[in-house]
Image: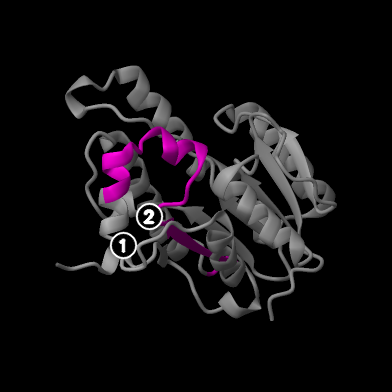
């Protein structure tokens, strides 16, 4: 049910953190995973992970890379994971930063999906796209308003593509991670913020990158063949927290 033997796909930003955790989970069950990231390097070596250095906001180059992979091996899945954020009060956010974060977190998700579309459409396993959204797509967080904007947009793209491509042999879903310690999350987490985060999670502990990877695996495996247009929270119960 969960074997990915014979499948080929892309995970963006898989050089570290959640992206690398996803890539490892998928590679461990047989998938050939292409990591498209700026560095093209990672902390683990795996026979099934191929690392390609590319800036996914560079439309011309990344389209060429996706086309080369698709023409040579086909594509069965695309995981749009790459993203960034930093703490910045809304009234001080520069136009340059607003454009930068939207290019990576939002525009690249749509463009990567476009580039992968003709190959996913031909997948013999049913093509899958999984976008990595966030709790910030559903909740307000101070000092990361641009990030909230991009992740809300990711869930909108997910639902729209799911409906538009439902008859094109492609299923589209998203996963909203809770707080997973990574280089990106640590940048916006001081001790006070950490205490608040742990306090509002019923499980009262942080997750691990592999926790997101196993949900992605479910969605792109045979088990996920009847699921599309959904956003799945993997957050220790945070989105269900009342008072």
Please provide percent x and percent y for residue 226.
53, 79
Q: CA distance from mark 1 to mark 2?
A: 22 Å
Residue 201's mark? 1
Q: Quadrant of the N terminus?
A: bottom right
- Earlier sequence position, callout 1 versus callout 2: 2
- The residue depicted at 35 percent of the width and 62 percent of the height is 204
Along the viewing direction, whichever of 6 and 243 lies nearer the viewer: 243
Please provide percent x and percent y for residue 221.
65, 72
Q: Please report the bounds of the magenta region as a residue range.
A: 167-195
Q: Secondary structure at mark 2?
A: helix
Q: Are marks 1 and 2 in contact (CB under 8 Å)?
A: no
User: Relative to residue 83, is residue 149 drawn left or right?
Assistant: left
- In this view, 5 is above or below 103: below
Instruction: Give the class, few, some or many, for how many residues have Cα within 10 Å of label 1's Cα (few <14, many ≥20).
Output: some
- The residue depicted at 53 percent of the width and 57 percent of the height is 208
Q: Secondary structure at mark 1?
A: loop
Please provide percent x and percent y for residue 144.
29, 36
Colour mode of the rendering: one colour
Residue 15: which quarter of the image? Answer: top right
User: Relative to residue 130, is residue 204 drawn left or right?
Assistant: left
Query: Residue 232 in magenta?
Result: no
User: Relative to residue 192, is residue 117 drawn left or right?
Assistant: right
Q: Quadrant of the C terminus?
A: bottom left
Residue 60: which quarter of the image? Answer: top right
- The residue depicted at 65 percent of the width and 58 percent of the height is 77
Q: Is residue 76 visible?
A: no
- Residue holding disc 2: 155
Please provide percent x and percent y for residue 108.
51, 38
Please state which of the two labelled residues, at mark 1 or mark 2, is closer to the viewer: 1
Query: Residue 173 in magenta?
Result: yes
User: Relative to residue 103, is residue 136 drawn left or right?
Assistant: left
């Amino acid at each position: 049910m969960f074997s990915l033997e014979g499948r080929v796909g892309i995970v963006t930003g898989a050089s570290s953190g959640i992206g690398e955790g996803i890539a490892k989970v998928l590679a461990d069950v047989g998938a050939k995973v292409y990591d498209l990231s700026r560095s093209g390097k990672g902390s683990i070596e795996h026979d099934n992970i191929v690392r390609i250095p590319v800036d996914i906001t560079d439309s011309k180059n990344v389209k060429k890379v996706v086309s080369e992979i698709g023409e040579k091996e086909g594509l069965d899945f695309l995981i749009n994971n790459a993203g960034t954020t930093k703490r910045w009060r809304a009234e001080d956010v520069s136009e340059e930063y607003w454009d930068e974060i939207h290019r990576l977190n939002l525009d690249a998700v749509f463009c990567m999906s476009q580039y992968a579309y003709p190959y996913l459409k031909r997948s013999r396993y049913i093509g899958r796209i999984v976008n990595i959204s966030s709790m910030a797509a559903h909740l307000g967080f101070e000092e990361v308003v641009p990030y909230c904007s991009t992740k809300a947009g990711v869930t909108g793209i997910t639902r729209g593509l799911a409906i538009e491509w439902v008859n094109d042999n492609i299923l589209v879903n998203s996963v909203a991670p809770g707080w997973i310690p990574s280089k990106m999350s640590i940048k916006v987490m001081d001790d006070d913020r950490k205490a608040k985060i742990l306090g509002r999670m019923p499980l009262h502990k942080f997750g691990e990158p592999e926790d997101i990877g196993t949900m992605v695996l479910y969605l792109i495996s045979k088990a996920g063949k009847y699921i599309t247009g959904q956003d799945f929270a993997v957050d220790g119960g945070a989105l269900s927290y009342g008072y």
